[in-house]
Amino acid sequence: MSDKALVAVLEKLDPFLQFLTKATSKTSVPVHLLEKVVPASESDGGSGNFQEALLELTYRGILNYQQDKKEVGFPPPPSSNLEGSSSRSPLLCAPPKKLIGKGLSGASDAAAKRRLKVLKWTFEQIPSWICQRKTSAET
C-alpha cells in the first residue's frame, strides 16, 4: 500500500474510531463497524485491502488491530508500554519522545495529529515494501 493511500485511510478511519471508542467507552471496536468508512479505492492503494491497511498501521505502531478478536483500537498508553513489550510494533523502534508527546492512545484531535505525524515519520524509517511483505505473509 502506498504511503499516500495509508495516510488517506488513517485520515478517514481515525475520526470514526475516535467516535466509536468514546460512544462505547471501550478501547477497541469491532472491525466490521469501520469497514464501510474507507472506500475500496482508498484502501486499495493498487494492491491492498482494508485488512492490509489495518495490519500495516499496526506494524507501524499507529493502531492496535487484533486479528483474532477482529477488533481495532488505538495503541495502549505509553505507561503500559514497557521496554521490549510485545505490544510495541514488531517493525519499529520507538519514535522520538518529542514526536509522540503524551502518546498515540486516546480519542482526541491532539492524539490524532500525533498519530499522523508518527505515521509520516515511519515512512522515512521503514519503506512500505517491507510492511507489504510482512502483511502478505500474515494474511
Image: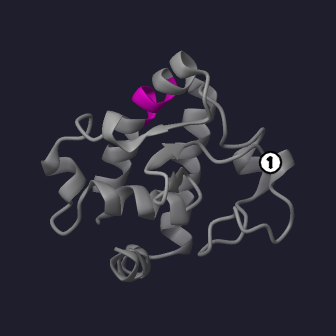
Residue lying at the far top of the rendered structure: 23
Q: Would you identify the image quadrant in which residue 88 lies? A: bottom right
Residue 64: image x %, image y %? 56, 52
- The correct choice, above or below, for 84 with respect to 43 in the image is below
Q: Is residue 134 visible?
A: yes
> Which quadrant of the figure has residue 137?
bottom left
Secondary structure, mark 1, is helix
Q: Residue at x 13, y 50 (%)?
A: 41
Answer left or right for 43 relative to 95: left
Residue 34, visible in the rendered structure? no
Question: Main SS of the magenta segment?
Answer: helix
Seen in the image, is 54 located left or right of residue 88? left
In the image, residue 15 lies in the stretch drawn in magenta: yes
Residue 96 x/y as whole percent = 75, 58
**The residue stretch that appears in magenta:** 14-18
Identity of the residue drawn at 43% across and 81% down? 130
